[in-house]
Image: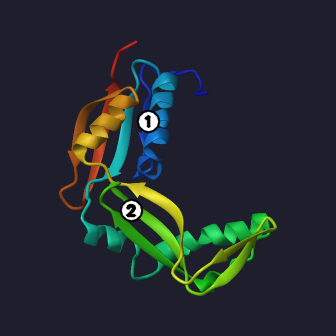
Amino acid sequence: MLPPAACERTLLVLPAATLDTFEPGAARSLLAMLRRLAGGSSLLLVGADATRDPELLARAYDDEHGVTAAFDKNVLVHLNRTRGATFDLDAFEHRAVWNPAASRVEMQLVSCTRQTVHVDGEAIALRPGEPITTEHCYKHTPEAMRALLGAGGWRTRDVVTSTRVPYRLWLCEPARWA
């Protein structure tokens, strides 16, 4: 629950592709919940990637310095620590795949060898090349973003597109004023 507003208007901010990591149904639910909690005079500012270029996405989600791979492998570190899992981080490679049909980047950890890992006492056999999907990151066209925001109860007031990087800021207001 949001605290009572001391101001006339509330600005909610979803920075840098936060919304993109939610499955579409969950994204709509989040937007609708924010709409209900924020009130009729609120504004919503959403940051979102503005590209679906596979080359740019590959460089962003499978960078040459391995930053994204280390972030992705942290999922296995967390499972080892909290669930008694037996993942060997060196037995997996990070891969980012653009899925144009779903309009998303799929982050995967791919088994390099035949192996059996244990999670919470359950044995899981993996073949070489078998992926574990760790995250989806949706890349919405402007039309799809407007539809997503609209389904969550928001109307686009303004869109600012960067001239230097493929990024947009969406300023929204409630679709129906309370």
Task: Name the element at disc 1.
Answer: helix
Question: Which residue is the site of mark 2?
Answer: 105
Neighbor class of circle 1 (other Cα within 10 Å; few <14, some 14-19, many 20+) is many
Instruction: Tell me residue 63's x, y (percent).
Output: 39, 77
Along the polypeptide, which appears first: circle 2 or circle 1? 1
Q: Is residue 36 above or below residue 74?
A: above
Residue at the image position 46 percent from the left and 20 percent from the top: 39
As drawn, 97 above or below 175: below
Residue 177 appears at what percent x and percent y? 36, 15
Residue occupying image coordinates x 34% and y 72%? 58
Q: Is residue 128 above or below residue 46?
A: below
Quadrant containing the N terminus in the rendered view: top right
Mark 2 and mark 1 in contact? Answer it, CB < 8 Å. no
Give amino acid for label 1. Arg
Q: Tell me if I can see residue 9 in this picture.
A: yes
Question: Which quarter of the figure has residue 136?
Answer: bottom left
For the image, the number of numbered tags is: 2
